[in-house]
Amino acid sequence: MSVTEETVVRGLVLACGPDSPNFPDVDGLRVEHVPATPGKADVDPLLGESDHFIVAGTDADLAAVVVRLLRKEQLAGVSVGYVPSSPDSAVAALWRLPTQPLRALALALRGEVDPVPLIRDDSGGVLVGRGTFRTVRGVAYCDEQLALRGPARTIEVEPDESGGPGLAVRVVKGAFFKRSTDFYSRAFQLGCVPNRPILDGVSFPRPVSKWTWYRHTEDLRLVRGVS
C-alpha cells in the first residue's frame, strides 16, 4: 500500500526520536520531529494546530503524546493515528494495526476513528499497550474480585479489546508449569513486595509497593478502522 497525492487529509505527524521513518510528501500532512517520549514542552505548543495527530514511534512515545492530550483536555477533539517503529508493538498487535511504515501511515490517514479504552494509572501516566509486573508477590484485585494472593510469575494488563469494562488482566503463576487466569474489570489494584512495573515497554523509574490501573472516563479516539 502506498501513500499518494490522492490522500488529502490534514494531519500532524509527530516523528518521535531519531529512529522514526522518513515519510513521503502528502498534501495537507505536516511532520514535526520531536524527542523520544516527548513531554510538555514538545507536544503542548502543537496542540490546537490539528484535530488529527499521527504518532510515529514506540508504544511509549504514543503514551507520552496521549498523556499531553489527556492533561490538556483534548481527548474528545483529537483523533490519533499510530505508525509503530517496531514490529513488536503491543498496541499494533492489540488493535491489529499494520507495522510496515507506509501501510501504517496510509491507515492513519484514511482510516476511521474507532474509540478504544484509555487506561490511566495512579502515578499520572497512561497505558496504551501493555503493562507488566514480573516475579511479583502480593495481593491484587480486579474491581472487587481477588486476582492474586501470593506469588505470580507475571501480571499483564492491557486495554480490553472485547468491549468489556476496560481492562484485560492476565495473572500467570507457576515456577515450572505456567497457569494463567484472565480477568476483566474497570480497575486493577496491586499491593506487593517492591517491584518495578514495565509500562508500554519502559521500566518505571523506581520500585513500587502499590499500583492501580483504571479505565478513564473518556476513550482514546484511535484511528484503526477502514472506511
Image (spheres, grey):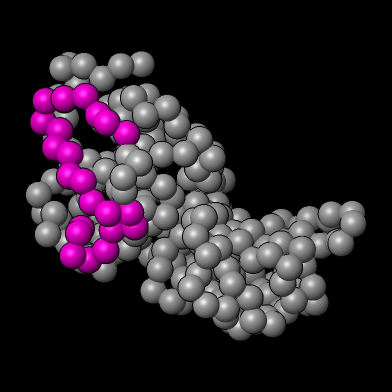
Is residue 211 visible in this depiction of the protein? yes
Judge whether residue 24 is colored magenta: yes
Q: Nearer the viewer, residue 103 or 58?
A: 58
The residue that appears at 75% across and 76% down in the rendered structure is: 137
State whether residue 206 is above or below residue 18.
below
Q: Looking at the figure, which quarter contains the N terminus?
A: top left
Tell me the magenta residue range. 21-43
Is residue 166 visible in this depiction of the protein? no
The image shows a total of numbered marks equal to 0
State which quadrant residue 81 falls in.
top left
Q: In the image, 216: left or right of 140?
A: left
Q: Nearer the viewer, residue 136 or 216?
A: 136
Provide residue 179's location: percent of width, then percent of height. 84, 56
Provide residue 115's location: percent of width, then percent of height. 38, 47
The residue that appears at 63% across and 76% down in the rendered structure is: 195
The residue that appears at 33% across and 54% down in the rendered structure is: 36
